[in-house]
Amino acid sequence: MSKDKVAWGITGAGAFLRECVDIILSIPKERIDIFLSKAGEEVLKIYRLWDSLKGYNLVLDRSASSPSCGFFYSGLYSVLVVAPATSNTVAKMVCGIADTLITNIFAQAGKAGIPSIVLPTDVDEGLISFSPSGKKITLNRRKVDEDNISKLKEMEGVRIAYSLRELKDALRELGL
Ligand SMILES: Cc1cc2nc3c(=O)[nH]c(=O)nc-3n(C[C@H](O)[C@H](O)[C@H](O)COP(=O)(O)O)c2cc1C
């Protein structure tokens, strides 16, 4: 089986969400599988972005053990991208907790030796985001979130994208 697909995890974050969906839409459907946390599915719908992913292979969080993690041992994926990644998911990742679809695939990607690229929502102090109704929101970064991103950066096989530009550059390096 050719190892040229990207597994893309979306968590329940409004920050960077629209931009990440735009990047996904630039990737051919046959080269990407999209994994959604329960909150990711909800937030996509709240921001009215659900329909834009029509036709893509979506893997939803409907089980406790995440059987779809098995795909990570099949040689299908060359990389896992988690973008956007909530504070919640990042905190679980650094603690080794794997109790949602996204934290499970992150753990299994690590165990299978598949590199991960993560775009956390808390990369910057005072990040500007937008509510579902379009209202501008300034997100203050907590110390715990800053510390968790630093810890995530130290995990083997993990690359942090500190901006959308860095995420796009990392994908370009992979030919995406
Ligand atoms: C409209 C909306 C936008 C949200 N945006 C963010 C965000 O940008 N960053 C974040 O860390 N959490 C955000 N949240 C909260 C997460 O969805 C929540 O913490 C959830 O439990 C995360 O679950 P997950 O990490 O499994 O996806 C948002 C929630 C809602 C309803």
Image (cartoon, rainbow, N blue to C red):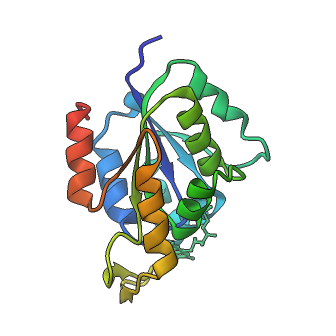
- Displayed quadrant of residue 134: bottom left
Q: Is residue 1 left or right of residue 164?
A: right
Q: Is residue 167 visible?
A: yes
Front in this rendered view, residue 95 or 126: 95
Front in this rendered view, residue 6 or 119: 119
Q: Is residue 43 left or right of residue 84?
A: right
Q: Position of residue 124 (x, y in %)?
A: 32, 75
At x 57%, y 64%, the residue is 91
- Displayed quadrant of residue 30: top left
Quarter of the rendered structure image containing ligand 1: bottom right
At x 47%, y 30%, the residue is 114
Q: Position of residue 158 (x, y in %)?
A: 42, 44
- State whether residue 101 is above or below residue 18: above
- State whether residue 169 is above or below residue 11: above
The C terminus is located in which quarter?
top left
Q: Is residue 52 visible?
A: no
Q: Position of residue 172 (x, y in %)?
A: 20, 39
Front in this rendered view, residue 33 or 105: 105
Number of numbered discs present? 0
Q: Is residue 164 left or right of residue 106?
A: left
At x 41%, y 62%, the residue is 150
Q: Residue furthest top?
A: 1
At x 47%, y 39%, the residue is 56
Q: Position of residue 120 (x, y in %)?
A: 42, 63
